[in-house]
Amino acid sequence: MATDDRFTEDFREAREDELLGTIAEVVTGPVADWATDFSHVEPEWAADPYPIQDDLRQRCPIAHTERFGGAWLPTRYEDVASIAYDTERFSSRSIILSNFRPPRELAPIGGSPPISSDPPFHHDARKLLLPAFTKAAVHRQEPATRAFCHSLIDGFAGQDVADAAGDYAQHIPIRVISDMLGFPPEDGPRFRVFVEDLLEGINLPPDERIERVSRLFDYLLVQVHDHIDNPRDDLTTYLLNAELYGHKLGPDHVVGTMALLLIAGIDTTWSAIGSSLWHLAKTPADRERLVAEPALLPTALEEFLRAFAPVTMARLVKEDMNWHGVDMKADDWILLSFPAANRDPAQFDRAAEVVIDRTVNRHAAFGLGIHRCVGSHLARMELRVALEVWLERINEFTLADPAAVIWSAGQIRGPRSLPLRIR
Amino acid sequence: MKVRIDHERCQGHGRCYDLAPGLFGDDDEGYGTVLGDGTVPPGQEHDARLAELNCPERAIDVVEG
């Protein structure tokens, strides 16, 4: 049996003893005023955040909340871009806003490098991943992705109504990323639970949240040991063998990056596919045009990414400062809303409309600056193939029941239930 | 007409090589590269402008001359 002494039983315990963060009081319940008490996990935001963001951009463009121990929400493109570019004053050491702040000593690596990393470490950790996610590299996943999309549609045979979120969109990124990481494809249903634990469970009591997050890491350790015993041509083996500064990666780095690749690729792309199908189901003119003009799809999908950008990131303020007129305190959160930036009328004409032939579209759905989504080429491929196959196989579809559409709460937004009438 | 990439700004979004594959390519890490010396052949001026106008990082310049 192969051994790798980086992954002995106690490496996580050592880390937990060293690093203690701070925990804020959990505050839930209806929002009093979005300018002073916002919460991106309340149902009103999940159902339709855009009117809230548009209102804030007008009357309070950098909103605040005391929840989560203090957080700011900029809604103008210009402010979102400034923060994304300013890694001197804003840290990425935690990019999921919650009631737990990891200690400053976690920087510059963070818990899930490179998304959680700050310069200069960030550049080197990111460089390890980039070759696996170029356009050419992800192109190799396209035939299998297309065949898998067809198999999902085959599964709708005989149904009048299909859940485009739960029975289509969700499965596509899960299959692609489990193939790339070399995880058993039958583990897919567990990944959904991990995603919900990590991204949607932010207001759970701290002990419960820690326990749920540790379930993901327990799973990843099983995969690590399987790959130590049976190395193969996939990202997990690649990370186990990768070196930085002349040494193999630390165990936290390996497992943190595996967590990132698993989680970040799933509900983001799932959301983008679902939101696009939701729009087409309720907008017959756009659906008919894309069925008639498939060559327009690459342009249209950029517009879906702009209008329904699934991903909001977070940052932590490094030091007390007055920033663009507000007094930020060290360790205040920033909710970095690329969706809000993408609907700023100062940046986009007809910002609130979905214009599927918009040819100038400098949107920020994949972020701006050094943390540009490392999987953006993969996400675009999956989104394009998922929509091509759906539109080829199912020309006509409508919302079966608009009231039955359920949107996820938190930093990743997309439909989690999307019943569509498909014939 | 010529195209240029500011490599300090480029983050590898790939909009240029998606929209104007005759003018741009990518390196082993996905960052944009200018093909040849960046001279835009006749008929590809529109592609050059599209690449410039869709770069999220404003890393692309189209220069006349």
Image (tube, rainbow, N blue to C red):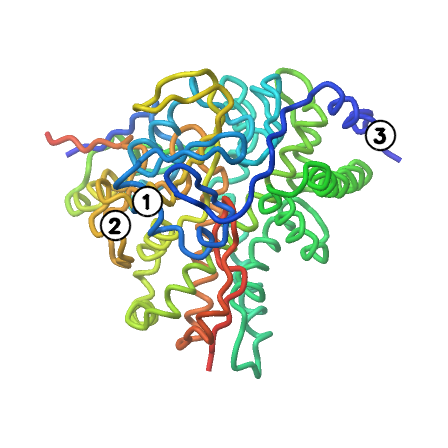
User: Could you tell which of marks 2 and 1 lies nearer the N-terminus?
Assistant: 1
Q: CB of mark 1 within 8 Å of CB of mark 3? A: no
Kindly identify which residue carries mark 2.
A351
Residue A269 placement (x, y as % from top left): 50, 52
Kindly identify which residue carries mark 1.
A342
User: Could you tell which of marks 2 and 3 lies nearer the N-terminus?
Assistant: 3
User: Label 1 vs label 3: CA separation?
Assistant: 45 Å
Kindly identify which residue carries mark 3.
A9
Q: Secondary structure at mark 3?
A: loop
Q: Amino acid at mark 1?
A: Asn
In the foreground, A393 or A61: A61
Please say if A384 is above or below A224: below
At label 3, counting other C-alpha atoms closer than 10 Å, the crowd grade (few under 14, some 14-19, many 20 or more) is few
At label 1, counting other C-alpha atoms closer than 10 Å, the crowd grade (few under 14, some 14-19, many 20 or more) is many
In the foreground, A386 or B64: A386
Would you say A414 lies left or right of A76 here?
A: right
Closest to the camera, between mark 2 and mark 3, is: 2
Residue A250 placement (x, y as % from top left): 70, 23
Q: Quadrant of residue A144?
A: bottom right
User: Label 2 vs label 1: CA separation?
Assistant: 7 Å
Q: Chain of mark 3?
A: A
Closest to the camera, between mark 1 and mark 3, is: 1
